[in-house]
Image: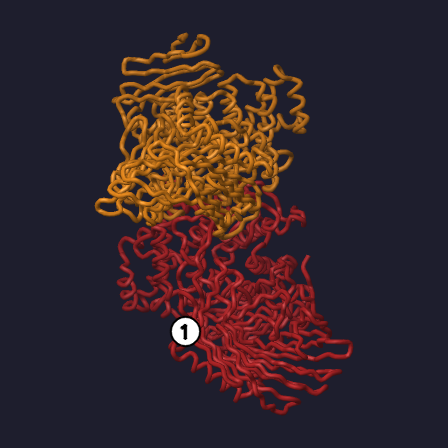
Chain colours: A red, B orange
Amino acid sequence: MHRKYLITDEWKIIERGFDPALHPCSESLFALGNGRMGQRANFEEQYSGRSMQGSYIAGVYYPDKTRVGWWKNGYPEYFAKVINSVNWIGIDILIDGQPLDLARVKVTDFYRELNMKEGYLLRRFTAHFSDMQRIEVEAIRFLSIKRDEIGAIRYSITPKGFSPVITYTPYLDFDVHNEDSNYGEKFWDEVFTSVASQKAINVASTKKTNFHVAAAMRYELEANGRHITLYPENIRREKYVANRFEIKTDEGTTYTLYKYAAITSSLNYPKDKVAEEADQKASEAMRTGFDTLLHEQAEAWARIWETSDIIIEGDPEAQQGIRFNIFQLNQTYTGEDPRLNIGPKGFTGEKYGGVTYWDTEAYCFPFYLSTRKPDVARNLLLYRYRHLPKAIENAQKLGFTGGAALYPMVTINGEECHNEWEITFEEIHRNGAMVIAIKRYVEYTGDIRYLADYGLEVMIAISRFWAQRFNWSEDKQQYVMLGVTGPNEYENNINNNFYTSYIARWCMQYTLNTIDLLRTHFPDQLQLVLQKTNFDSDKEPAFWQQIIQNIYFPYSEKYQIFLQQEGYLDKEQRLASELPMSERPINQHWSWDRILRSCFIKQADTLQTFYFFEDDFTHEQHQRHFDFYEPRTVHESSLSPCVHVVLAAKLHKIDKAYELYLRTSRLDLDDYNKEVHEGLHITSMAGTWMSVVEGFGGMRVRQQRLYFDPVLPRHWKRLSFKIIFDGRILEVNTTPEGTHIVRHTGEPITLILKGQEITV
Amino acid sequence: MHRKYLITDEWKIIERGFDPALHPCSESLFALGNGRMGQRANFEEQYSGRSMQGSYIAGVYYPDKTRVGWWKNGYPEYFAKVINSVNWIGIDILIDGQPLDLARVKVTDFYRELNMKEGYLLRRFTAHFSDMQRIEVEAIRFLSIKRDEIGAIRYSITPKGFSPVITYTPYLDFDVHNEDSNYGEKFWDEVFTSVASQKAINVASTKKTNFHVAAAMRYELEANGRHITLYPENIRREKYVANRFEIKTDEGTTYTLYKYAAITSSLNYPKDKVAEEADQKASEAMRTGFDTLLHEQAEAWARIWETSDIIIEGDPEAQQGIRFNIFQLNQTYTGEDPRLNIGPKGFTGEKYGGVTYWDTEAYCFPFYLSTRKPDVARNLLLYRYRHLPKAIENAQKLGFTGGAALYPMVTINGEECHNEWEITFEEIHRNGAMVIAIKRYVEYTGDIRYLADYGLEVMIAISRFWAQRFNWSEDKQQYVMLGVTGPNEYENNINNNFYTSYIARWCMQYTLNTIDLLRTHFPDQLQLVLQKTNFDSDKEPAFWQQIIQNIYFPYSEKYQIFLQQEGYLDKEQRLASELPMSERPINQHWSWDRILRSCFIKQADTLQTFYFFEDDFTHEQHQRHFDFYEPRTVHESSLSPCVHVVLAAKLHKIDKAYELYLRTSRLDLDDYNKEVHEGLHITSMAGTWMSVVEGFGGMRVRQQRLYFDPVLPRHWKRLSFKIIFDGRILEVNTTPEGTHIVRHTGEPITLILKGQEITV
């Protein structure tokens, strides 16, 4: 069903042989990023085959006019999109006047490698121009982690069997388009271009949002390592600058072009300085030199792997899969800048446009919390804190009052981007994930002060939303929550979704508890927050308590389980195992109404409650709910299997856990859903990390204390992972013989391993 | 809140004074149609102000590519649109070289009249070119009812105070656009043009659907009634043909241009004949002459009014309103052609694109059944019969099998056009209306043979759909119908909508009863139908009976009412009267999710059940349900008040009935919803007829027997209406003194007046 064309290697993603049909997939899989910018694995040289050009700059977006069939009140007017930005990798090549275009020449010995250990992309191939005449090409490039505005390319050509004239055209091009543009528009306007010998600057601005982005380049050419003086021609057209020069080559000599690009934006510099800054940085990159930059890159990645690597012995595919996921997460988001966040496709594609979904808080947060210094997780929280005024505005648009906040389903600047009523207006459980992330951060770091400074303000606004979103049912004599969509998007506009009502109740209670906590620890700061939010200390807590104590949760006496929503048992009860393979995934084979009416669950919903709030339920409840819901879950969201893995591992259903783990860890590498060409599933990669560390590694954090209860899949010989906790780097090693925890840095710590206190 | 600018007159719609802001509304209100084609009240001469050009030909459509934000499986790829067709009215005028453009010259004495009695549009105005120099214009036009491919215009200009040169450019133009084109495309391609002195032909074809439409024109000019010989210049450009000529005028002389246009289409002629046919018909029209054609028109309308007029004395606005509604219904659909149907905007605008909604069967059917010969209603039924194979295909796409049919929400050729999942896939009650119309037809005409020839086939397919659409609930131990949208579109994806489940049950029962009936009356024909439909006489009736006997209907013991849907009483119960005027209509002020969660009802839903199946419920049940639901109904669909009028009248709540009647009868004339510029609410006009005849007139038909139980609004001095029943024209006259029924034609008949048998 899925295509496997990559070679398994523990540290590399490798493609051998060139198949143009797979190239768009490889463009996603081999994409590079450094948190500040990203680049799909497009070719440097011209390519007339199928390709999706993608060069992305974090935080630079365009508000494309929303397009819907039937407008509903409350829809946002715009959908913010990460946009395809400057093509800075471009180096067009002519060989004796003929374009080097892999779609048009015979290609052999094609080799592509994503080196995850050192963070670069390597490509080698031989292009044949006649029986005897060929060139051997090696191209290597990276986006510097240390200098996050720099990209560097080393592009070598060795003619064999002839001595052609090679024409090089290194360029910078802002005349690019987005594949998902709603109205076919291009999003960039030219601001300034400048081109001289071996240097060029290209500045463009985004329409409407008026971000200014500057790209500058330098390049040089060597022949067998000897510098060659060039006399290039300058080329300039709208939004495009280039040099062009010809080299009369010698057969067997290697001609190496080094191209250095710097990309700066008005997010970080005044608009009148972006060009100058880019130019200086490009110049500096060339002075530093490719080898030094590449060395820095390997060092930077070594530091990242130092705290985030996971070793799986006895399962090379799983090993490659988990490293690929960790690599991509670190390419996507570094946590340096609280204005940025984690898009579902990272820098690997355009789909899903806006950047931030509940994925960040619900799935990505634990990864960054455990593998990076606490500022990173804190920056993720601050991102939402900064958006609080817009979340309050968003709720107002929907008719909520008094400082209630509804965080957007999709956003890039705090404003809602999404426009499907059943999601935009109804998938409100996302509000709960904001508070879950705060709780996790505080539990992990013990940083109660964050609650006083930022957290409580967000929590009050969200609790106010919940208090208004429940309504009293005269009929049930309980509070109900009508018209919601839970995490399982195969149900829309349902009543009393267990997950949503549960997390809403928990938010309100946690907010009240936090107020009590801060009253003890930060009474002055608490008063400031209560004043700032106009909190009515008499009425609001009392009203919330009244709701908390009277919420209706649908329950089946027969099955002794909470029901995903009211009426779930009215559906025809079938199991996913009864579905013929020809009808799966159902979202590609069934009409939408048939999906809605079926009992099949797209992704963890009731079980998501058990994941977030596991201590609220007994082992028997876990068992019953897992046994009921897992067979009805089709896992047609990439975010689904990971939660089931954690629960299955907890229940010691190791085979089930491993089966589900396989679906998540190599989702993109093996292209299960035939959609990798659109980009990678970045946020679900954090789910894979969660599967390993919280599932097989059995890690939990409760009140700043660590618990481990590992269980290994049968054939794994070793599982080893590191986490950063309270200033220490800890390494957890599990083999079939047992678990051993090592402390690499910091003071000794006491933790709970399989129920036993140990100090390491 | 609404604008009243029209003068009340019993037989005319009159506008005095020219207000460009109101012109787009008047373009709708004064539109003409003859069932075959229609024309908004655009000006003949050029006009640079705000205007929506509209010339429509019944049955000629374009499948515009569907546009949605988020695609769902099962959506149709195309949305069939009635398209703006040839501009045949155009006569550009220059006065001494200056365009006669009402947006640019001073206009006085503007008078516009829609003469409903005789079926023409009249316009008079004076245009001033300087203090003393002015022209007086009178334009009259109509679309011939008798010759339904002919339009004729008499356009007179009388210069006063000067003797200008007048330049005339009568033309035919296919280079037109649709305002609601999804991708800004023009829908016509040129096929053939020909232009000569005082005659022209213009043939164009629609893209994709390749309908060919030909327009031909003739014209002549008179000065004070004397024929003038013209030497026009021929003008031809893409999709446009015209003549141009100048006349040196004499002050005070009236120059009258007669323009005759014929429009033919490939719906009715071979493609290679449309031009010739149009040309002949235009020529014939000119030979016949304007006065004769206009006389024919008045006669044709007299015949229509003979059987469809309603007289209301004591309420001139109500009188004008009801005549306007009847006039428009007869302009829209004549029932001559079973390939045609009744669009929500008729020929008055583009909105809602496709032509046929459930409006036809649920609201329009009784009007045509009672005021026209039975073939007309029968043609409406045959329209759906012809679409049965497509309805079966449509159901297949959604996963239904074995000959189950789901009629489309919106269609023009039998294919679904709509693309909102909550409507397209879920507002399935429309299937029931198809069977209601069949039942009404048979009850009214006694034509049981129709059931054998056509009706049963449709009914079996629809019942099969219902049988699959219910599912057995283990939990309830009853059949449930999940995930539907009832007539009240302010609820989506609800479970066990009372109306839908009720009509579904009734359809299945009625189908079974019909099979029994035909077994007696048409056993051979029955066998053919059962064979053709592969009907399983053992299993299908038994399975349907099992469902029929075990359907879950939500019911409130507390209120002793059926609930609109399961869980309706979980909503906060408010009354429409509590809504501040500033929030009404709620669909313009509330976000969609707020509307969905509220208890407010857009249009009759549970009460629609009581309307269709009134004999199934006791008077007390009527009372209780009306008293519960009417105060929660906001009537934000034009189709809502009429049903409530009928029920209120039945319950002798005359003031309530009259209040609601006012909302329906002058909806467009008084532009209640500020949307008249987009076109008229044609289908709801039939609801107005229903309000009068079934509401105040208290007419019912049961088993081919007529019942009358009239109740008049307090200030009405007389209500008089005619119906055609079983070959007789009957006139029902109600005054405060009592009701008198007169038979105009045919044999004596016995009917029930206020419970008493009488023979007239």
Q: How crowded is the residue under tag 1: few (<14 C-alpha within 10 Å), some, or many (20+)?
A: some
Which quarter shows the C terminus of chain B?
top left
Give the side of residue B582 with respect to residue A296, left or right: left
Q: Give the image location of residue A296, x and y in percent.
A: 55, 84
Residue A596 visible in the current orientation:
no
Q: Quadrant of residue B449?
A: top right
Seen in the picture, residue B379 relative to A148 is either above or below; the reply is above
Give the side of residue A660 with respect to residue B615, left or right: right
Along the line of sight, the residue nearer the viewer: B37 or A652: B37
Q: Residue at x 51, y 51 (%)?
A: A489
Q: Give the image location of residue A550, x and y in percent.
A: 38, 47
Give the side of residue A586 with respect to residue A196, left or right: right
Q: Residue at the right extreme?
A: A131
**The disc numbered 1 marks a residue on which chain?**
A
Residue B294 visible in the current orientation:
yes
- Residue tagged by mark 1? A267
Q: Give the image location of residue A699, x and y in percent.
A: 54, 66
Which quarter shows the N terminus of chain B?
top left
Along the line of sight, the residue nearer the viewer: A279 or B627: A279
Q: Residue at x 34, y 52 (%)?
A: A400
Count every numbered label the image shows and give the total.
Answer: 1
Could you say whether the residue bearing mark 1 is in a helix, strand or loop?
loop
Along the line of sight, the residue nearer the viewer: A562 or A249: A249
Q: Give the image location of residue A461, x and y in percent.
A: 34, 58
Q: Residue at the left extreme?
A: B131
Q: Name the amino acid, label 1.
A: Leu
